[in-house]
Amino acid sequence: MSNKKHRAFLKWAGGKFSLTEQINRRLPEGKRLIEPFAGACSVFLNSDFDEYLLNDINADLIAMYNIIKRKPKQFIIDAKHYFQPQYNDEKNYYKIRAEFNQCTDPYQRSLLFLYMNRHGYNGLCRYNQSGGFNVPFGRYKKPYFPEKELLYFAEKAKKATFVCKPYQKLFQYLRDDDVLYCDPPYVPLSKSASFTGYAKEGFSLDDQANLARLARESKCAVLLSNHDTTLTQELYRDASCDKIQVSRTISSNAESREPVGEIFALFSAIEANKK
């Protein structure tokens, strides 16, 4: 694989582009990489496995990935239409957002999803309790149309299968030569810092504990990343852990973007294989 780093075509809160080298360094060898929380797919785009099984609970995201995999050139032509200057307008943004929330056609929803990702505030992906996308207008001068990123994604997607299932299900499909990378919604650093609404079901502390249990009991190696907190240190106590400092960019106030601790926990599956 070349040393060139490949950006995701989506803007993504909590995206792993800046950490792909750190993650690759910690991923064990295997034939297939499974990601139960694929998000914008930065790890997929910057790793080198023969196969990928990429999952996310966000049905709009997975539908779009499957469409781009099947017909990238048509998708690019149709998506580019929404990146004309007249669409970078508050009134039109809210009109398109309302259209998206009423739309049931997967192809049209995918076009509008990409539009809102690039024109909405801070690249957030957030839904209300009724399942309606509710991110406000972003007020960018000239939103970027990620054509080359889309083309690279579509080419690499030939190696990937995209599915939309609860994260627990991915642990049922394991083969001996699989490796898992889990990037769940992070444990909040404070009560006010919880980033919720990505999927209306949310991701609870019980989910955090359940994911750690599944990793511990997995027949394959599992690498997890999360905030470095007392809770995650306890949840991952049976894993090989190391920590780094990273800059967080989800804060809207650039002055408050202090480095925070990130923990990587590797469950090696050695014990599971002895059974």
Image (cartoon, rainbow, N blue to C red):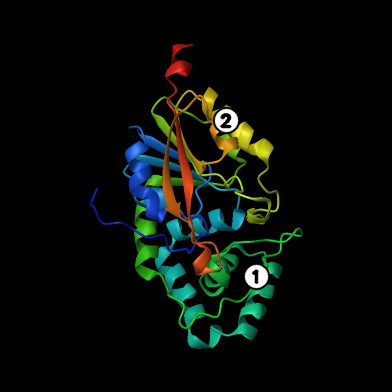
Instruction: Specify the amino acid type for callout 1.
Output: Phe
Instruction: Specify the amino acid type for callout 2.
Output: Glu
Q: Which mark is residue 100?
A: 1
Mark 2 sits on what residue? 234
> Observer-nearest residue: 204 or 32?
204
- Mark 1 secondary-structure assignment: helix
Q: Give coordinates of residue 29: x percent, y percent.
A: 33, 32
Q: Could you give the CA–CA distance between mark 2 and mark 1, rounded to whole angstroms?
A: 42 Å
Q: Give coordinates of residue 177: x percent, y percent.
A: 38, 28
Mark nearer the viewer, 2 or 1? 2
User: From this viewpoint, which residue is outermost toward the top?
Assistant: 275
Q: Residue at x 34, y 42 (%)?
A: 24
Q: Earlier in the sequence, mark 2 or mark 1?
A: 1
Indicate whether 227 appears above or below 116: above
Q: Residue at x 60, y 66 (%)?
A: 109
Q: Residue at x 62, y 83 (%)?
A: 90
Q: Is residue 97 left or right of residue 51?
A: right
> Observer-nearest residue: 28 or 186?
186
Q: Residue at x 41, y 38 (%)?
A: 33
The crowding category of the residue bearing disc 1, from other C-alpha atoms within 10 Å (few below 14, some 14 to 19, many at least 20), is many
Indicate whether 132 appears above or below 93: above
